[in-house]
Amino acid sequence: MCGAPGSGKGTQSDRIVEKYHLAHLSTGDLLRQEIATGSELGKLLDSFISKGNLVPDDVIIDILAKHIDSLDADCAGVIFDGFPRNVAQAEALEKMLAERNEATSVLLDLQVEHDELITRLLNRGKVQHRSDDNIDTIKQRLVVYEEKTRPVNDFYKNINKYQAVDGMGTMEEIFERIDSILKQF
Ligand code: AMP
């Protein structure tokens, strides 16, 4: 599940997981869990996240490698939420899965207009008090998205696994659009 910050990746992932009995692996959630422990690693992670920058690939790939083999073996599949965030991570994911005789099925690109992203993130900031949902950090996250994450779409287009999803509208409408794609798998 990909898309700009505020595009609804987490919200829609929760719905998909519920309907399709998938395991949910959100790198953002895993990073925030580590930060919540107050560990030295957590402090280092927060220094990237609170500035709106990506956490270095080796840290992310390490976290992923730790979790991927501990997922419920009986689940129908896995939804990666907020990962891969750049082309190097996409390559690492494909390699990690190939080594396990697994493969990705589809990249869902949730597309939301710029002003709507900012509105949603500022609203979430008021409720969830995340260190990165403030206007300066939001602007940087959107720059990072354009520079680093958007090229991941082309990576999946090249291997015929890309599907754009209109991410504007109600949660229900967006879920219906995603669901009509996932029914094909
Ligand atoms: P998210 O919850 O997906 O919006 O992620 C929040 C923040 O965590 C991002 O702005 C990044 O700083 C960091 N982060 C989450 N996932 C990744 C990833 N795959 N690679 C690098 N940084 C990440």
Image: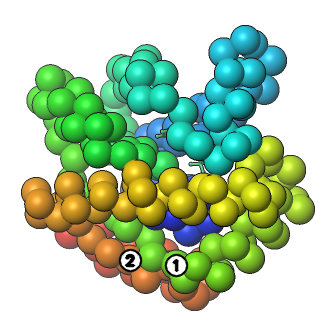
Percent x, y of residue 99: 15, 23
Identify which residue is drawn at 72% across, 54% down. 137
Percent x, y of residue 161: 18, 61
Q: Quadrant of the C terminus?
A: bottom left
Q: Is residue 51 above or below residue 66?
A: below
Percent x, y of residue 155: 20, 55
Tell me if 26 is positioned left or right of 37 in this view.
left
Dot label at residue 165 = 2
Identify which residue is drawn at 57% across, 62% down. 142
- Depth check, mark 1 against mark 2: the one in front is 1
Q: Is residue 78 above or below residue 13?
A: above
| Residue type indicated by callout 1 | Val
**Which secondary structure, mark 1?**
loop
Q: In terms of image quadrants, where is residue 83? A: top left
| Residue type indicated by callout 2 | Val
Query: Which quarter of the frame holds ligand 1?
Result: top right
Residue 1 in view of the camera: no
Dot label at residue 112 = 1
Dot label at residue 58 = none
Q: In terms of image quadrants, where is residue 122? A: bottom right
How far apart, in angstroms, are the residues tagged by discs 1 and 2? 9 Å
Identify which residue is drawn at 65% across, 27% down. 45
Q: Is residue 51 above or below residue 109?
A: above
Mark 2 Cα shell of 10 Å, populated few (<14), some (14-19), many (≥20): some
